[in-house]
């Protein structure tokens, strides 16, 4: 029997590299990977070509000073800070809302899971614009919430909710929470319920079992979902535009202004590239720690 | 019931009186006395466990044996506290624990897929129950070392579970289950995921460990060989009901009914009506007359009954051989001759439609051809009669 175990250990040890030639190390595409070619062509046309156009514009229309113009623009610098702050808070709200939701989906009975998943899908299938306007209808000074409170006699004057940070964070979190829910759910699905049961049998109260076992094992999913939402929130335009205050300019708005108001397409292009750079930087740093595949939901979280 | 319990207790005392085993360890505990009284678990109106009562004396290794859907795992989960029984009591050391939450039951458990915490090292895994049960930090180190030594995993403290083989993970799970010195250890198909050789060596090891530690073990399995090898007693379950509770020998040599006979070991079973006096009574079956064993109860007379004959009790003879009238015989055609290493399995197509199995010593010469007409014979005393 010891022989069996020793053999098992041997299998676990990394096999020494046979050091093949450089060319041999490039995997030959299998037959099936050719299926990806149309998608690749499509992506090249609709993504890489415009990117190249923007890149060219930012350096040539009228010249590389676009970047210094962008960085020196007070509006843009303020918008960077406003946007990053917004993305940060939205991420926090998303995670707080999504965690119990995803946990219930991973552990709940059939009925609960069906209801939660249904609500999630409905939210996914509804246009962001519609959902944002729905919040406007709710939060307006003459909106559903204020009217109800006034009619109930709880307040005399409408509470200012629309065009504040509060409404932006709320609306953004609503639009983006499905992404954190799904990444967290994917992670929690890999945590076997027996682990919590085992912890309980060993004397852990359910709350301790959760804190010691479930929470640490779900953190990679939370990190992945958080990064995904943070990055998406950075580039969001519609929702902050509709729900936010005109005094707070977000990156998207700042870029549009350059293009449409100041008619400086080149500066707008430079600002877009700076935004893209920030996103790539965040992904790069996050990818170092939790793996890019996990953030994009490509691999099973284990 | 009382007689059974008395008998069990008598036997337990002899078990306890056995000399101490080779392993001297402070992990030793007195096993818990577990009584299950009329446990019922309903899902809707379907019973998963249907009125099971079991008395498990301290220090016994009891296996809940049954096919999938027999209720064995449900019963184990009720004892652990993951499920609430619809009715019935779980009494451990004379204390009713049905309302005690899982984390206060102080039970050790080995899960089917080990349920090791993947983000903790072996040491942290084994330390987990100690930390939860407020064992002083100073004492933990030694207890962990002792538990790991008991499963021969000293030196693996800083490995992560995924760096271990299946058998090693199983041992860590075992160490973790016994480290806090529970008096009752539950095991849910603990060896199911391992290959046969590893399974067999771990069966022996787990048995040795449980004997050395003196704890009571309730093990769930669908593997009758595992049940026979490891258990002091087997509780055979089918359709949520307790079919038979007894030592492996009892279940094998004296199955209480057809279900037990079919589940434990191979069986040739004949059904028919009993005729004649208790002495020399016969069973009329579609396959002919079969002589009942002398031990058959007189109550069977005139009733439907079954006769169980173990394959190892049957002999194959040439169709032309003269047959003693005092033995049972059954003509047929030899349809398969399977060499299985230590034994030879012979399948015979009975002339009356039934398929019969014979087990014989593989080292003995076998002078028959497949397709040859043969006669199977066995002594009536080697068979077992029961109410149909």
Image: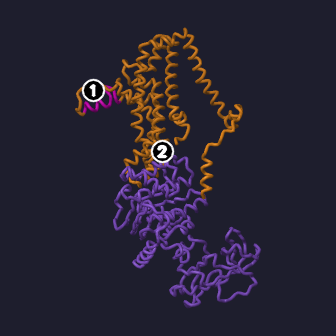
Chain colours: A orange, B purple
x then y, percent, for residue A97: 39, 37
x then y, percent, for residue B236: 50, 69
Chain under numbered label 2: B
x then y, percent, for residue B287: 65, 80
Residue that numbered label 2 is attached to:
B119
Question: In the rendered structure, does residue A177 fall within the stretch colored magenta?
Answer: no
Range drawn in magenta:
A138-151
Q: Nearer the viewer, residue A38 or B178?
A: B178
How far, Cα to Cα, is label 2 from label 1? 51 Å
Chain under numbered label 1: A
Residue that numbered label 1 is attached to:
A158
| Residue A197 visible | no
Q: Residue at x 53, y 72 (%)?
A: B248
Near mark 1 (Cα within 10 A), the count class, few <14, some 14-19 or many ≥20, is some
Q: Nearer the viewer, residue A220 or A189?
A: A220
Q: Give the secondary structure at mark 2.
A: loop
Q: Looking at the picture, does residue B223 appear above or below residue A81?
A: below
Q: Looking at the picture, does residue A14 appear above or below residue A282?
A: below
By secondary structure, the bulk of the magenta-drawn segment is best described as helix
Question: In the rendered structure, does residue A150 fall within the stretch colored magenta?
Answer: yes
| Residue B301 visible | yes
State the mark number for residue B10.
Answer: none
Quadrant into which the N terminus of chain A falls = bottom right
- Looking at the rendered image, the disc whose residue lies closer to the viewer, 2 or 1, is 2
């Amino acid at each position: 029997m010891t022989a069996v175990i020793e053999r098992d250990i041997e299998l676990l040890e990394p096999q020494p590299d046979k050091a093949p030639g450089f060319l041999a190390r490039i995997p030959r595409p299998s037959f099936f990977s050719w299926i990806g070619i149309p998608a690749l062509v499509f992506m090249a046309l609709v993504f890489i070509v415009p990117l190249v156009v923007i890149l060219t514009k930012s350096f040539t229309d009228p010249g590389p000073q676009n970047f210094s113009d962008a960085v020196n623009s007070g509006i843009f610098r303020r918008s960077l800070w406003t946007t990053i702050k917004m993305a940060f808070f939205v991420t926090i709200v998303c995670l707080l809302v999504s965690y119990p939701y995803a946990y219930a989906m991973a552990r709940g009975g059939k009925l609960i899971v069906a209801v939660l998943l249904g609500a999630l899908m409905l939210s996914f299938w509804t246009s962001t614009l519609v959902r944002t306007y729905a919040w406007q209808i709710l939060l307006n000074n003459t909106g559903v919430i204020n009217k109800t409170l006034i009619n109930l006699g709880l307040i005399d004057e409408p509470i200012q909710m629309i065009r504040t940070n509060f409404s932006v964070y709320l609306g953004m979190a609503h639009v983006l929470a499905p992404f954190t829910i799904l990444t967290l759910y994917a992670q929690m699905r890999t945590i076997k319920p027996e682990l919590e049961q085992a912890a309980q049998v060993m004397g852990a109260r359910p709350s301790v079992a959760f804190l010691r076992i479930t929470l640490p094992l779900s953190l990679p999913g939370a990190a992945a979902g958080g990064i995904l939402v943070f990055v998406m929130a950075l580039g969001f335009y519609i929702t902050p535009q509709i729900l936010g205050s005109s005094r707070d300019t977000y990156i998207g708005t700042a870029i549009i202004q350059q293009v449409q108001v100041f008619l400086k397409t080149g500066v707008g292009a430079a600002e877009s590239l700076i935004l893209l750079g920030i996103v790539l930087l965040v992904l790069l740093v996050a990818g170092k720690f939790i793996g890019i595949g996990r953030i994009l939901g490509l691999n099973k979280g284990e | 019931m009382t007689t059974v319990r008395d008998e069990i207790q008598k036997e337990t005392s002899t078990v306890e009186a056995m000399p101490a085993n080779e392993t001297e360890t402070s992990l030793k505990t007195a096993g818990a006395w577990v009584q299950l009284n009329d446990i019922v678990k309903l899902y809707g109106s379907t019973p998963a466990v249907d009125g099971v009562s079991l008395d498990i004396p301290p220090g016994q290794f009891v296996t809940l044996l049954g096919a999938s859907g027999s209720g064995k795992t449900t019963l184990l989960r009720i004892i652990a506290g993951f499920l609430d029984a619809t009715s019935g009591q779980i009494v451990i050391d004379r204390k009713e624990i049905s309302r005690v939450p899982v984390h206060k039951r102080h039970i050790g458990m080995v899960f089917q897929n080990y349920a090791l915490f993947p983000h903790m090292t072996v040491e942290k895994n084994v330390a987990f129950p100690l930390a939860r049960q407020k064992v002083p930090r100073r004492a933990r180190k030694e207890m962990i070392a002792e538990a790991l030594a008991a499963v021969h995993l000293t030196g693996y403290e800083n490995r992560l579970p995924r760096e271990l083989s299946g058998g090693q993970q199983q041992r860590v799970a075992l160490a973790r289950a016994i480290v806090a010195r529970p008096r009752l250890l539950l095991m849910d198909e603990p060896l199911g995921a391992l290959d046969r050789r590893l399974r067999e060596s771990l069966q022996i090891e787990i048995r040795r460990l449980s004997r050395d530690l003196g704890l009571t073990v309730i093990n769930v399995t669908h593997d009758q060989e595992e049940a026979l090898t490891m258990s002091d007693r087997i509780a055979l379950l089918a359709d949520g009901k307790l079919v038979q509770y007894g030592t492996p020998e009892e279940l094998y040599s004296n199955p209480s009914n057809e279900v037990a006979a079919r589940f434990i070991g191979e069986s040739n079973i004949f059904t028919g009506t009993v005729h004649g006096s208790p002495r020399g009574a016969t069973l009329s079956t579609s396959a002919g007359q079969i002589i009942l064993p002398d031990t058959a109860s007189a109550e069977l007379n005139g009733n439907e009954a079954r006769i169980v004959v173990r394959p190892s009790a049957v002999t194959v003879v040439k169709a032309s051989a003269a047959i003693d009238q005092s033995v049972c015989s059954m003509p047929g055609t030899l349809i398969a001759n399977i060499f299985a290493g230590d034994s030879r399995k012979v399948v015979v197509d009975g002339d009356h439609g039934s398929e019969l199995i014979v087990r014989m010593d593989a080292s003995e010469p076998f002078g028959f051809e497949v397709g040859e007409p043969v006669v199977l014979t066995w002594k009536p005393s080697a068979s077992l009669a029961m109410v149909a």
